[in-house]
Amino acid sequence: MSTYVLIHGSWHGAWCWFKVVARLEKAGHKVVAPDLPGLGRDRTPVAEISPDTWSDHVCRVLDGESDPVILVGHSLGGLIISQVAEKRPEKVRTLVYLTAILLRNGETLLRVARDEDDGTSWVIPNLITSEDESYSYVRPEAIKDVFYHDCPDEDVALAGSLLVPVAMKPMKAPLAITDERFGRIPRVYIECLQDRATPPSLQKRMYSASPCQRIIPMDTSHSPFFSRPDELVAHLTSL
């Protein structure tokens, strides 16, 4: 039995993992899928979200586990699992980046997302940012095309009712990681070849700059937890 900790991405919450959690648990594994502060059902105000709020929250989750975990980050969750690996390397067995942000030391999510965009990301033209740039959201009428174009209609409807604005401050802060801590943990990248939010070209640039032990392709949108949960769980359990 392994313990999987699943970290969701921007605007989402633990709810996005419901199909994956059920399948992993049925296979005999322990699964923890927390809501990040200010997202999902957590009501932490945007003004209280610092660059370390999300990673510190996940560190507390890991502190409650007796054995090292397989730490999975989707999209923005990749930034968070990198931070957690630096802070708690002894608590992480494997890092799994699911079409996720994989930065190098000193990089920021916003700069990489904007500077490395080759015009194929559907997020940027559909992103609405608050006047003070403290939070953002994606235009509701665009969410299916951006995130879920191959997903069942009922899952798209669920997501549409649950997505919330996300704090921007952690995305502006440079990532601080070291080879001695973060760098010693095995990394796996699951690339999604139809992704319109984190385009395949950006995924490849990130995992080429920060090499991983395995690259696993999935022919899906940004949200394989909805469109291909059985295939995704098979990849996760193969680790």
Image (spheres, grey):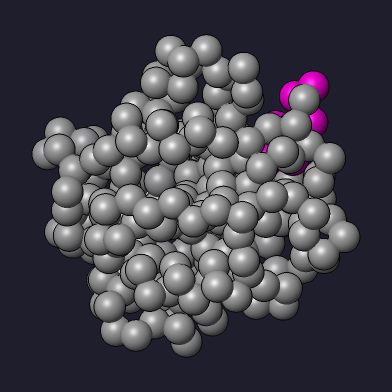
At x 33%, y 36%, the residue is: 231
Q: Locate the C terminus and report the quarter of the image it occupies.
A: top right
Examine the structure image and report whether residue 61 is included in the region drawn in magenta.
yes
Can I make out residue 210 in this image? yes
Quadrant hosting residue 92 = top right
Decide which of 107, 27 is in the foreground and name it: 27
Q: How many marks?
A: 0
At x 23%, y 45%, the residue is: 160
Examine the structure image and report whether residue 136 is included in the region drawn in magenta.
no
At x 31%, y 74%, the residue is: 121
Decide which of 231, 60 is in the foreground and name it: 231
Q: Residue furthest left?
A: 153
- Residue 166 vertical position relative to residue 123 in the rendered view, above or below: above
Which x, y percent locates residue 129?
A: 39, 72
Decide which of 50, 150 is in the foreground and name it: 150
At x 33%, y 51%, the residue is: 218
202 relative position to 50: left or right: left
Magenta residues (range): 57-66
Quadrant hosting residue 217 = bottom left
Secondary structure mainly formed by the magenta segment: helix
Which x, y percent locates residue 191?
A: 41, 57
Decide which of 48, 239 is in the foreground and name it: 239
Can I make out residue 75 in this image? no
Q: Locate the N terminus and report the quarter of the image it occupies.
A: top right
Which x, y percent locates residue 8?
A: 48, 44
Which x, y percent locates residue 88?
A: 81, 44
110 relative position to 86: left or right: left
